[in-house]
Image (cartoon, rainbow, N blue to C red):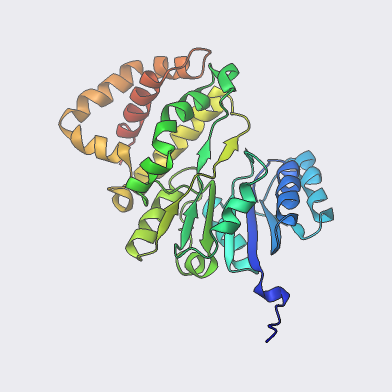
Amino acid sequence: MLFHTDKHDKKQLSILIPTYNDACYNLVEELHRQACEEDIDYEIIVADDGSTDENTIQTNARINNIPQCSYITRNENRGRAAIRNFLAKTARYDQLLFMDCDMALPDNLFISRYINEINDEADVIDGHTCIHTDDETWGRNLRYITERAAAPMHSVEMRQKTPYQSFATANFMIRRETMLAHPFDERFRFYGYEDVLLGKELYLCGAQIKHIDNPVLFKDYEPNGSFVAKTEEAMHTLHRFKIELQGYSRLLTLENKLRNIAPAIRLWHMLFGKAERRILTGSSPNMTIFNLYRLGYYMSIKE
């Protein structure tokens, strides 16, 4: 007996990329090339969350010329959570691959590895991130230094030990029905921790997360001053949602352990915080001062 197979038996994938003032045409072009090599139905959607840089907008507008790819602009900046929820609602297929716009693909098999996971029982497949092994030229860059320090925690083995706390949104695949049932919390309008709260929500709803070795690469690193400002913004986000994020943030766990000496930490930050910040935004930052500054900054935020 002959069985008829139509195109709807193919695996299907929606690749979703939020962006804000960041050109991602080259990334989309490479994703498109890899997807074309797979026997799948796919789409690539880039959603622009109210970018203000006209050159970036014009560059990304070329995405509409790539088959099965679209670039959607939105007039108002709604924040990191809302733009991802918008993408999930816009997508047509049952598997959603979310990627950050400022990343690069590690090799020619990135899409293939995710396609191989589509029939897995897991609701979420996390590929995570990594740094280039030849990035030593960035040795004075604070973002690079922090990512290099965190790299051992990003192995599959380490992530799978705490699968929900290790979940990150730079590069993951999720069932559309799971994403729509448990969207990003749109109170998170500013930088940081929207992925951490989603990890907690996935745990509470019983969704299965599988961690795999399929990272995206940091292609560049923002200047030290910009990264310190983003870190400060993240500390305010963490402080605002500290009740919901208990148990899912190492910094909150550390704060609880150091509660008895909190006044001393705040005094230290008041006396030395500006000097620490000058070092971090200068040409010789280091992790020790970064950790001291971040802890002091967080514990000095007013209620």
- Residue 237 position, x and y percent, is 41, 44
- Residue 89 position, x and y percent, is 60, 67
Determine if residue 71 is in view. Answer: no
Quadrant of the snapshot with the N terminus: bottom right
Instruction: State whether residue 227 is above or below residue 11.
Output: above
- Residue 233 position, x and y percent, is 46, 37
Task: Give the residue furthest to the right.
Answer: 65
Instruction: State whether residue 235 is above or below residue 171.
Output: above
Is 38 placed left or right of 173 in the picture?
right
Is 137 placed left or right of 52 in the picture?
left
User: Residue at 72% of width from left, 74% of height from top?
Assistant: 7
User: Residue at 68% of width from left, 40% of height from top?
Assistant: 22
User: Residue at 65% of width from left, 45% of height from top?
Assistant: 20
Is 89 placed left or right of 199 in the picture?
right
Decide which of 290, 243 is in the foreground and name it: 290
Quadrant of the snapshot with the C terminus: top left
Decide which of 202, 106 is in the foreground and name it: 106
User: Residue 72 occupies which quadrant of the picture?
Assistant: bottom right
Task: Give the residue furthest to the bottom.
Answer: 1
Task: Give the residue furthest to the front.
Answer: 1
- Residue 23 position, x and y percent, is 72, 41
Task: Give the residue furthest to the left.
Answer: 260
Decide which of 114, 185 is in the foreground and name it: 114
Determine if residue 299 is in view. Answer: yes
